[in-house]
Amino acid sequence: MAQKPHKPTDALRRQAEQASGLGLPHDQICALIGISDETLRKYYGPELGIGKAKASAQIAKTLFNKAQSGDTTAMIWWTKAQMKWTETQRHENTGDGGGPVELTIKWSDGK
């Protein structure tokens, strides 16, 4: 028996968008809606992208507000993620008297 073609509804579009925004993987969104991954991508591509973008925007807004209010952790995260600030440490190894490091490798023949 042939399966009926899938017909997206406004309710299903909202469900796909919300599930995507919550971070559910495609296989779980498919299970919720009762469709295959191919059908999900064919009919709900924009909703998947919009859901993720809306969620990311809300989290970014919350983080930004926390940073502006003086939350040190949020400020550090923001400067690293958005301003590309990094904490760098440089380590140099030198040999005797500041010269090159000498390595001696001993091979064993297994005897």
Image (spheres, helix red, strand yellow):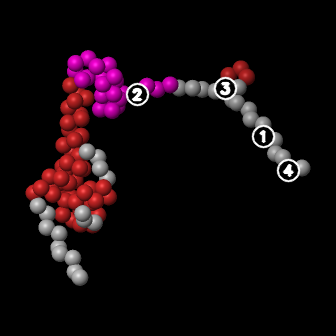
Residue bearing mark 4: 110
9, above or below 1, in the image: above
Please tell me which of labels 4 and 3 falls first in the chain.
3
Name the residue rendered at 30%, 55% in the picture.
28
Can you see residue 69? yes
Q: CA distance from mark 2 to mark 4?
A: 47 Å
Question: What is the residue that sits farthest to the front in this orientation?
Answer: 1
What is the secondary structure assignment of the residue under circle 3?
A: loop
Residue bearing mark 1: 105
Please tell me which of labels 1 and 4 falls first in the chain.
1
2 or 36, nearer to the observer: 2
Asked if labels 2 and 1 touch by Cβ distance under 8 angstroms, the answer is no
| Residue 70: assigned label | none
Quadrant in the rendering for residue 76? top left
| Residue 86: assigned label | 2
39, above or below 48, in the image: below
State yes or no: residue 81 in magenta.
yes
Amino acid type for the residue under numbered disc 4: Gly
96 or 31, nearer to the observer: 31
Amino acid type for the residue under numbered disc 3: Thr
Amino acid type for the residue under numbered disc 1: Ile
